[in-house]
Image: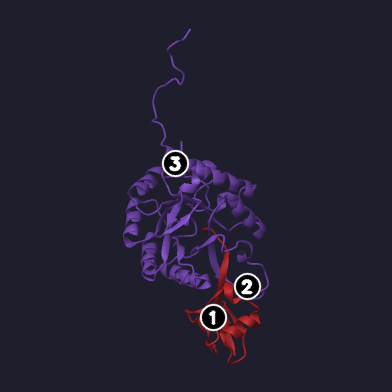
Chain colours: A red, B purple
């Protein structure tokens, strides 16, 4: 199935949950936050959140920043 | 004589104490090593960070948290780059989710040319965040009226700009900053506009509780050395403020006694 991940098309196995996605991307769940269709997915719900076709996901973390 | 110096003079924000009154941004450095060295040299306890998309095409790349230990530095997530209250609130909700931080810096900008704070959107955003339990430090204009409004709605720190972000022009409106300091019962920090050490001292001499800067350190020819300069400039200004400066006089006043002259 296809989803939008950080603004770009991304292909993912049907039935995947957030933990599967994080593993597939080789990311560290402790250092990021995820928004699914404009709603934050709490870390405690990563495993039980099934991603669906067409979902819009944002994965963010902290970068260096002052003001801009 | 017991002179009050830094250790007993902490910055208190949102019921937390910090030994340094210098807060630094972590953007614009050459690399993470330089960011970490400057942060260390500055003595800062609080560092601002931005929230951005993870680079999913290169998941193994180094991240800020590998270089600045979040258990040693207090991460202050900001909303740099947000031009609406909605975007800023969305960004800080995500920031809280990354690591549970509720102390945040709100900035809602007006336009790209000036990066001047949009105070109407800032007030809207601050109200939403406070309702959601955030402790909000707010980048704002140097207008005492707006600063009072922010305090009334319950922000935890007021952070007027000294000059446009990244301009290095120094404090342009000393009267405005001083009026804000005098009327406020929450901490006031100059945020943005500092160019060199004397600007930081000046902010502290005006009675500000702290200074937040990024470009003045990051764009110095030697950022680590400038971080050291800022560390001492903030302390110097703070101590000068606490010491209470002498009266200004129009005419000379000799330091040596005139009696007993040969």
**In the image, residue A53 above or below residue B56:** below
Q: CA distance from mark 3 to mark 2?
A: 43 Å
Res. A59 visible in picture: yes
- In the visual, does B178 lie left or right of B79? left
Crowding at label 1, few (<14), some or many (≥20) Cα neighbours within 10 Å?
many
The chain holding disc 3 is: B
Q: Chain of mark 2?
A: B
On the question of residue B199 being in view, the answer is no
Q: Are marks 3 and 2 in contact (CB under 8 Å)?
A: no
Tell me what residue is drawn at x 59 percent, y 54 percent: B39
Using a 10 Å C-alpha cutoff, classify the residue at mark 2 as few (fewer than 14 neighbours), some (14 to 19) or many (20 or more).
Answer: some
Q: Horizontal placement of B149 versus B113: left or right?
A: left
Vertical side of B119 occupied by B41: above or below: above
Q: Is residue B207 above or below residue B116?
A: above
B77 or B257, which is in the foreground?
B257
Q: Residues within 10 Å of mark 3 (few under 14, many from 20)?
A: many
Which residue carries the number 3 mark? Answer: B205
Q: Residue at x 64, y 54 (%)?
A: B37
**Residue at horizontal 53%, vertical 72%?**
B98
In the image, which is nearer the foreground, mark 3 or mark 2? 3
Contact (Cβ within 8 Å) of mark 3 with mark 1: no
Across and down, in percent, residue B48 comes to 52, 60
Task: Please give the label number shown on residue A57.
Answer: 1
Query: Mark 2 highlights which residue?
Result: B55
Q: Helix or strand or loop: what does disc 1 sit on? A: strand
Secondary structure state at the residue bearing disc 3: helix
């Amino acid at each position: 199935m296809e989803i939008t991940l950080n603004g770009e098309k991304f292909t993912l196995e049907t039935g995947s949950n957030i933990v599967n996605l994080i593993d597939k991307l080789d990311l560290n769940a402790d250092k990021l936050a995820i928004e699914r269709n404009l709603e934050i997915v709490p870390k405690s719900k990563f495993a039980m959140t099934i991603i669906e076709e067409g979902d819009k996901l944002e994965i963010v973390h902290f970068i260096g920043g002052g003001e801009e | 004589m017991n002179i009050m110096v830094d250790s007993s003079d902490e910055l208190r924000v949102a019921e937390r104490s910090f030994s340094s009154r210098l807060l630094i941004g972590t953007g614009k450095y050459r690399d993470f090593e330089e960011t970490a060295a400057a942060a260390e040299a500055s003595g800062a306890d609080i560092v601002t960070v931005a929230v951005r998309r993870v680079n999913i095409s290169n998941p193994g790349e180094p991240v800020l948290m590998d270089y600045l230990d979040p258990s040693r530095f207090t991460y202050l997530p900001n909303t740099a780059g947000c031009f609406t209250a909605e975007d800023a609130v969305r960004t800080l909700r995500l920031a809280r989710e990354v690591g549970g931080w509720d102390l945040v810096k709100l900035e809602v900008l007006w336009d790209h040319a000036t990066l001047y704070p949009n105070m109407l959107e800032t007030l809207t955003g601050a109200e939403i965040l406070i309702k959601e339990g955030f402790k909000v430090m707010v980048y704002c204009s140097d207008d005492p009226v707006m600063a009072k409004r922010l305090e009334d709605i319950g922000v935890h720190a007021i952070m007027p700009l000294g000059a446009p972000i990244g301009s290095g022009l120094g404090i342009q409106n000393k009267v405005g900053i001083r009026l804000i300091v005098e009327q406020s019962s929450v901490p006031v920090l100059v945020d943005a506009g500092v160019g060199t050490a004397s600007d930081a001292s000046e902010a502290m001499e005006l009675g500000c509780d702290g200074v937040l800067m990024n470009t003045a350190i990051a764009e110095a020819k030697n950022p680590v050395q400038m971080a050291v300069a800022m560390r001492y400039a903030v302390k110097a200004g703070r101590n000068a403020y606490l010491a209470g400066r002498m009266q200004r006089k129009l005419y000379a006043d000799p330091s040596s006694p005139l009696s007993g002259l040969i």
